[in-house]
Amino acid sequence: MPENNQSDFEIGYNYARQKHYLLTNRDSRFFLELGLAFLFEQGVTAELSKGMGTYYLEQVINLFTPENTHFSGSS
């Protein structure tokens, strides 16, 4: 149950984080498209959507950070 002091953005972000396990078999392109779709939502639920979009775009970024990529070698 969300805390009363959370913004709509935080509620959306935390909801996406909690439900992420439902999408475990998806690739990075799916998360990129999902994140962008939520991020650019307008209307009454825009802040909830932006929170969800931010979470999914962070997941894409995390997939490509150096500690998650399996490249070896020095730069």
Image: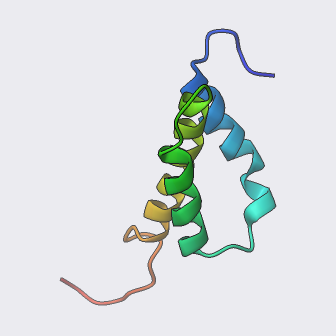
Residue 27: x and y in percent read 62, 76
Residue 4: x and y in percent read 69, 9
Task: Name the residue rendered at 62%, 29% in the picture.
Answer: 45
**Extreme-bottom residue of the structure:** 73
Q: Nearer the viewer, residue 37 or 23?
A: 37
Q: Quadrant of residue 64?
A: bottom left
Q: Nearer the viewer, residue 30 or 71?
A: 30
* Residue 25 vertical placement versus 74 (above, below): above
Residue 30: x and y in percent read 60, 70
**Extreme-left residue of the structure:** 75
* Residue 63 vertical placement versus 69 (above, below): above
Task: Name the residue rendered at 28%, 90% in the picture.
Answer: 73
Residue 63: x and y in percent read 49, 69
* Residue 12 vertical placement versus 22 (above, below): above
Q: Quadrant of residue 5?
A: top right
On the rendered image, what quadrant is the C terminus found in?
Answer: bottom left
Task: Name the residue rendered at 47%, 72% in the picture.
Answer: 68
Q: Nearer the viewer, residue 20 or 31?
A: 31
Left-right relation of 25 to 48: right
Task: Name the residue rendered at 60%, 25% in the picture.
Answer: 44
On the rendered image, what quadrant is the N terminus found in?
Answer: top right
Q: Nearer the viewer, residue 66 or 63?
A: 63
Q: Quadrant of residue 34?
A: bottom right
